[in-house]
Amino acid sequence: MEPVDVIEGKVSVLSRADVDTDQIIPKQFLKRIERTGFGPSLFYDWRYLPDGSPDPAFELNRPSAVGATILLTGANFGCGSSREHAPWALADYGFRVVIAPSFADIFYGNCCQNGLLPVVLQEAEIGGLIRRAQGSDAYDLTVDLASCRVSDRAGFSAGFTIDPYRREMLLRGLDEIGRTLEQEYRIAAFER
């Protein structure tokens, strides 16, 4: 897993609340267990028309969204069924950070376990960021996990909180297995 420290990148806006995991990655794409290859299926039912062509009205299909690494979205993002494929799809698409007023608990944990940084900001802060992003062809943010701050070049700056254990794991690029393997020598000593 790649460590998360400072993410500077282009912002894409998905101004919707209660986006469930079946919209993030629909069930028909859950047949594989590899963590890659899910990006093209991200938001599939919203991104594509019935004939398979991209829907030009969908937010991520707009030219201003190309290359975005930070997703701004609405409250309760990642609700619905628990599926680790949802953060896999977001990461495979290119997102490194998702900023929302709130997340479903299991989705939030799955993001942290897979190197995707979920950031909770106040609804008013998110609203301001969405207005800035929608008023620009290329809006960038800096998300600094070490200092727990989100900022832009126009003077916006807001702090966020994250559990210290999850913060450390993301900063070091570890999941639970990687963290356990750091203790391999102690485990081996105990087994002896």
Image: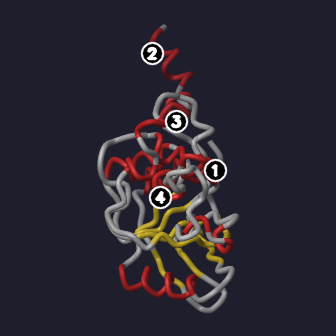
- Report the front residue among 183 and 119: 119
Give the residue type at disc 2: Phe
Name above or below for residue 19 compared with residue 126. Answer: above
**Mark closer to the chain start, 1 or 3:** 1
User: Which numbered marker is on residue 190?
Assistant: 2
Residue for badge 1: 3
Residue mark closest to the camera, 4 vs 2: 4
User: Which numbered marker is on residue 93?
Assistant: none
Spatial CA distance of label 3 from label 2 is 17 Å
Residue mark closest to the camera, 3 vs 2: 3
| Residue pictured at 56% horizontal, 41% vertical | 174
Residue for badge 4: 46
Give the residue type at disc 4: Trp
Residue for badge 3: 179
- Report the front residue among 192 and 160: 160
* Residue 101 point in image, percent of width and height: 36, 71
**Mark closer to the chain start, 3 or 2:** 3
Spatial CA distance of label 4 from label 2 is 52 Å
Spatial CA distance of label 1 from label 3 is 13 Å
